[in-house]
Amino acid sequence: LNDGIGFALPIDLAKPIIEQALADVDIARPYVGVVYTEIDAQLAADESLPVDSGAWISGQFSDSEPVVAGGPADEAGLEAGDIITAVDGLAVDSTNPLDLLVLRYAPGDAVTLDVLRDGENLTLEATLGTRPADLSS
């Protein structure tokens, strides 16, 4: 039974994956190389974060390092504790979480990340990598 529950993937996100599958090439998903927690008002209050939305680079809820060594985020200069607030000007929030925003791009694409670090706004450029096949999430 589905009880009226449906899941939708915007065509803009699905189209590149479909095109790769139809061309019979390996499907390559873009990859930033961070472990993050999506910020909402409750988490912001609980952790005294300065914003109510974004992607908080924190290994707090994972056994993994928050920034993958040698990955795109590491090369761009992202650090544990940073909060990614936008990707190419699109806000990272509950409607547009980081993983879905990144799916708009292909591995090798450069993106501009708006980052909040210790109260300072930074703009960093990251060149997206190819998501390793062995990642579980």
Image (cartoon, helix red, strand yellow):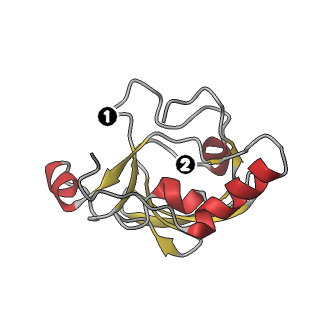
Q: Is residue 113 above or below residue 33?
A: below
Looking at the image, is 87 positioned above or below residue 107?
A: below
Residue at (32%, 64%) from the top-left corner? 53
**Image quadrant occupied by the N terminus:** top left
Q: Position of residue 83 (x, y in %)?
A: 41, 56
Q: Which residue is mark 2?
A: 78
Asked if residue 46 lies left or right of residue 21, the reply is left
How many residues crowd mark 2 within 10 Å: few (<14), some (14–19), many (20+)? Answer: many
Q: Are marks 2 and 1 in contact (CB under 8 Å)?
A: no
The quarter holding residue 112 reads bottom right
Real-space Cα separation, disc 2 to disc 1, in angstroms:
16 Å
- Label 2 sits on a secondary structure element that is loop
Residue shown at the point (61%, 60%) measured from the top left: 14
SS assignment at label 1: loop
Q: Label 1 belongs to which residue? A: 60
* Camera-side residue of 100 and 3: 3
Does residue 40 appear to the left or right of 36 in the view shown?
Answer: left
Q: Amino acid at mark 1?
A: Gln
Q: Quadrant of residue 105?
A: bottom right
Mark 1 neighbour class, 10 Å CA radius: few under 14, some 14 to 19, many 20 or more:
some
Q: Measuring 45% from the left and 27% from the top, which residue is drawn there?
A: 64
Number of callouts: 2
Where's residue 30, x and y in %? Answer: 66, 49
| Residue that protrudes farthest toward the front in the picture | 1
The amino acid at mark 2 is: Leu
Q: Is residue 41 visible?
A: yes
Q: Which mark is residue 102?
A: none
Q: Residue 101, relative to residue 34: is it above or below?
A: below
**Quarter occupied by residue 125:** bottom right
Q: Is residue 136 above or below residue 120?
A: above
Q: Sequence order check: which comes first, mark 2 or mark 1?
A: 1
Choose between 33 and 106: the one closer to the eye: 106
